[in-house]
Image: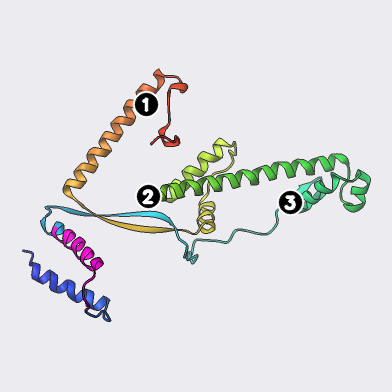
Amino acid sequence: MINVNNILHLFDNLVRRKYPLSSHTEPSSQDHELADQLFQLFDQLLNVAELQVDNIVTLDINAYYDDDDEEYQEENKNPIFYDIDGTKYSYDTMCAVVEYAKSHSFSSLRSRYKRIKSKQHLQRIRKYVKDDGTTFQKLQRIDEFVYAELVRARESYIPMHDFDIKRLAIKKAREINLNSFTASHHWILNFKHRHHISSRKITKLMTKHHLEDRNEILKSAENFVKTVNEMIPKYTEDHILNTDQSSFK
């Protein structure tokens, strides 16, 4: 049998231990508001037949991000060297070669960069610069897209997780034909570190009635998806709208 007086006494002790320096003053409007909210929660806890604590771990963009993550490893900033006809070049050096070749003759280029063996050698350097530069730009687009989606989800109070980062990143990579990109665990850690993203646990108290409602919603959602999947083949793409990507409200 629950004794309300015992609960209040124990709660009072917990508060005094947690906030020992608090002194009594005239209650403010905010004090009254918080007390009302606590009472409503307390009353709910006492009267529900069944209660479940639901912990949701979501990602949050934190201005005071703590990068003390045991799994995080700083991105490798050492230059990557490319082997072209037996000669190794860094990406920066190849960019310099290509830029110099735009305004100078090949003989002048060879005088400055003596490892350039032929015009075919220069062409290979140009190709590497173009391909690698394109890859870098695509990675930037993936990064910007995923971050924008996380911000949008945060503003809409939609919980996000690491697998959402992976899903969004791979989706964008496929859209821009970067099929070799896998959104590895290491990439996700670096992405979170770059944007000061950390995990945050949200605790929700749900009554039995709430749980039953949620189960009904999930069941309804499954039925909706099944129905839509059966209907889509009957229509052309021009007659199908993805409301998640539209500006309709």
Q: Quadrant of residue 122?
A: top right
Q: Amino acid at mark 1?
A: Asn
Question: What label does residue 159 carry, if any?
Answer: 2
Residue 103 locus on image (x, y percent):
87, 45
Element at label 2: loop
Circle 1 is placed at which residue position? 229
Q: Earlier in the sequence, mark 1 or mark 3?
A: 3
Q: Secondary structure at mark 1?
A: helix
Residue under numbered circle 3: 91
- Which residue occupies 93% across, 51% down? 111
The location of residue 233, given as percent across then percent down, is: 41, 20
Task: Report how far apart the C-alphas of labels 1 and 3 lie in the structure.
Answer: 47 Å
Task: Answer few, some or many: residues within 10 Å of disc 1's Cα (few below 14, many 20 plus, some between 14 and 19).
Answer: few
Give the Cα distance between marks 2 and 3: 39 Å
Please say if the residues under marks 1 and 3 sit with CB atoms less than 8 Å apart: no
Camera-side residue of 37 and 96: 37
Residue at the far left: name it: 1
Coloring scheme of the render? rainbow
Give the alpha-carbon distance from disc 1 to disc 2, as whole Å.
25 Å
- Quick one: SS at disc 3? helix
- At 74% from the left and 45% from the top, the residue drawn is 129
Decide which of tag 1 and tag 2 comes sooner along the chain: 2
Magenta span contains residue 31:
yes
2 vs 3, front mark: 2
For residue 128, what is the image quadrant?
Answer: top right
The kind of residue tagged 3 is Tyr
What quarter of the picture does the C terminus occupy?
top left
Q: Is residue 6 magenta?
A: no
Q: Which residues are magenta?
A: 25-43
Q: Is residue 46 left or right of residue 187?
A: left
* Marks 2 and 3 close (CB-CB < 8 Å): no
